[in-house]
Image: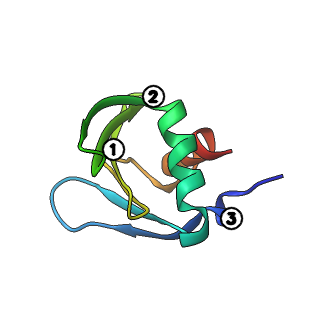
Amino acid sequence: MSTLEEYVARVEGTCGEEKDVIVTFKYEKRAEAMARILSRAEVKSSFSGIVYELTFKNLSFRLYPSGKAIFRSVRDREELNRTLAALLL
């Protein structure tokens, strides 16, 4: 069975007023992670395949082909982990 650790290399918080979280996917799993996320989340907009603006369960985030995702206004780490598990596993 897959785990989040197989896909996620690093999780970092951003500075500022809003609680944004940057998730970096492992290089060897980034294409698979992107495919799973794009198939499960709602694509709001896409800018030439460089940036995807997505929503999933009322949480908005951006996905980049470089293997990063920026989740906006995440309440806590548990919410992030639940969302990532629903998107990836």
Q: Nearer the viewer, residue 44 or 17?
A: 44
Q: Which mark is residue 57?
A: 2
Q: Quadrant of residue 67?
A: bottom left
**Amino acid type, residue under disc 1 in the picture:** Phe
Alpha-carbon distance for marks 3 and 1? 21 Å
Provide residue 40's location: percent of width, then percent of height.
Answer: 53, 31
- For the residue pair 89 and 72, the one nearer the viewer reads as 89
Label 1 neighbourhood size at 10 Å, few (<14), some (14-19), many (20+)?
A: many
Q: Please, which residue is most extreme toward the front here?
A: 48
Mark 3–mark 1 contact, CB under 8 Å?
no
**Element under disc 1:** strand
Mark 2 or 3, closer to the camera: 3
Q: CA distance from mark 1 to mark 2?
A: 11 Å
Q: Which label is found at residue 61?
A: 1
Q: Earlier in the sequence, mark 2 or mark 3?
A: 3
Q: On screen, 64 above or below 75? A: below
Are the residues flagged by discs 1 and 2 in contact, CB closer than 8 Å? no
Secondary structure found at label 2: loop
Disc 2 marks which amino acid? Lys
